[in-house]
Amino acid sequence: MKRNLWYGVILWAIIFVEVSVIGFTPTLATQGENGFVLLPMGLVLHFLLLATMAFLLATQYFKKATPSPKAGVKAAAVMVGVGLVLDALITVPFFVKSYVLFYTKWSLWVGIALVLIIFAWRGKKLEKHPDLARDF
């Protein structure tokens, strides 16, 4: 459980930096009333980077945990929960100013689903082929 919490902090920090960089790139985002708004190309880039980060983190996570889809979903749920709490404590009050606007963005929930799916898929793949995690 402690590892899941730390992985959640790591995932949140990487996403925070990644979205900040994309957000301050004029061709990928624009300024809105409550911070920046990612343009379509910025969203595509964000989701590609998020999928890559989730894949790498899941692979690393299952080097020391028994892989299975259920274990993947459980681990990802804890990590996502940590991220949501950190967003509530840091991202929203300092950068967005509106909890409602932040937590009702479709892109947030698609990102959460993406992380859960990738961890479950990676757990299933490594359950069948555990040597893949060690060789990565």
Image (spheres, rainbow, N blue to C red):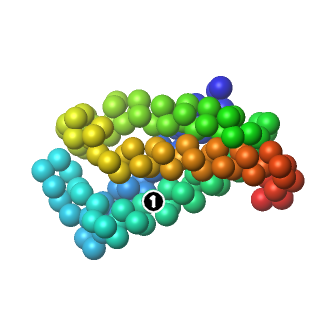
Residue 30 in picture, x, y percent from top left: 21, 64
* Residue 25 in view here: no
- Residue at x-position 83% and y-position 49%: 128
Asked if 94 appears above or below 135 in the picture, the reply is: above
Q: Is residue 120 left or right of residue 131?
A: left
- The outermost residue toward the bottom is 27
Q: Is residue 33 left or right of residue 120?
A: left
Q: Of 22 and 126, which appears nearest the observer?
A: 126
- Residue at x-position 63% and y-position 54%: 55
Q: Which residue is mark 1?
A: 47
State the quadrant of the N terminus.
Answer: top right
Residue 86 in picture, x, y percent from top left: 41, 33
Q: Of 57 and 76, which appears nearest the observer?
A: 76
State the quadrant of the C terminus.
Answer: bottom right
- Residue at x-position 63% and y-position 45%: 119
Q: Quadrant of residue 21?
A: bottom left
Q: Of 103 and 31, which appears nearest the observer?
A: 103
Tag 1 secondary structure: helix
**What crowding class fits label 1: few (fewer than 14 Cα within 10 Å), some (14-19), or many (20 or more)?**
some
Amino acid carrying label 1: it is: Phe
Residue 61 in picture, x, y percent from top left: 70, 43
Q: Of 126 and 36, which appears nearest the observer?
A: 126
Asked if 22 appears above or below 60 in the picture, the reply is: below
